[in-house]
Amino acid sequence: MAISLIREEQEHIIRVLPILLKKDEQFKTSLYSVLSETFVKKDDFSELKEIVRELGVTVKELAEAQKRTEQKVEELAEAQKRTEEGIRALTESHKNLAQKVGGLDHTVGFRLEDESYKALPGFFKRDMGLEIIGRLKRDYIETGKERYIEVNIFGKGMLNGKEYTIIGEAKSQLKKRDVDDFIKHAEMVKGYVKKEQIRVLVTYQAHPGVQDYVKKQGIRLYFSYEF
């Protein structure tokens, strides 16, 4: 029943449509407009296919470019990893070298101190008439419970019936900042050992400007080649 009605409607449209197209120009124009907007022409369809094809090529190229970019990023990440490992190894090597140099500097310093303990008493007697009481040594000054100040060269001396504290330090290459640090250190010791100090520095070498600075601070200066 329904199929029969549809066929009758189709036949009716086919009969009536040509008549309407001839009689009603507005209907004709409207119908062509709807058809042109609704259906794609053959030329348009070909153009659409070309666009789709070009888009496919472009997407493929973009995918390949992205793949190359990802490879470059991976290569850069790997290179950065190798660089970081190299820096880490270099840092560790520098740390080890610094420790060795520091250890060597301490060894040299200790040797210079050991030599000064033997040489300084004679220098003090020759240059000042001061007599060392006991001996010079490396010592620790107690400042509190389990708290100490280390002193590289320490002892007592007698001059004109007055007792002095001998305090000194040995540096392989004496610099101005070493002199300033030593003065601060000596002042700290003075807070716990009240006797008047005779200060002395011993070194292998020092710039003339540093030597003048030491003398202006009232510190005695001796070189290892004098021992």
Image (cartoon, rainbow, N blue to C red):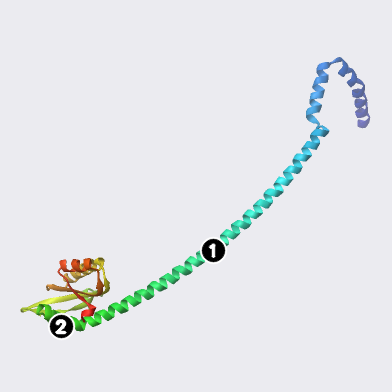
| Alpha carbon separation for disc pair 1 and 2 | 62 Å
Residue at 20% x, 84% y is: 118
Element class at badge 2: helix
Compared to 204, does 88 lie above or below?
Answer: above
What's under tag 1, amino acid-wise? Lys
Q: Quadrant of the N terminus?
A: top right
Please tell me the numbered disc located at residue 8. none
Q: Quadrant of the C terminus?
A: bottom left
What's under tag 2, amino acid-wise? Gly
**Residue of label 1:** 81
* Closer to us: 185 or 169: 169
Q: Position of residue 97 (x, y in %)?
A: 40, 73
* Closer to us: 25 or 56: 56
Q: Position of residue 92 (x, y in %)?
A: 44, 70
**Residue of label 2:** 122
Element class at badge 1: helix
- Image quarter for residue 215? bottom left
Residue at 70% x, 45% y is: 58
* Label 2 crowd (10 A; few <14 / some 14-19 / many >=20): some
Residue at 80% x, 36% y is: 45
Is 198 displayed left or right of 42 in the figure?
Answer: left
* Label 1 crowd (10 A; few <14 / some 14-19 / many >=20): few
Q: Earlier in the sequence, mark 1 or mark 2?
A: 1
Is 95 displayed left or right of 1 in the figure?
Answer: left
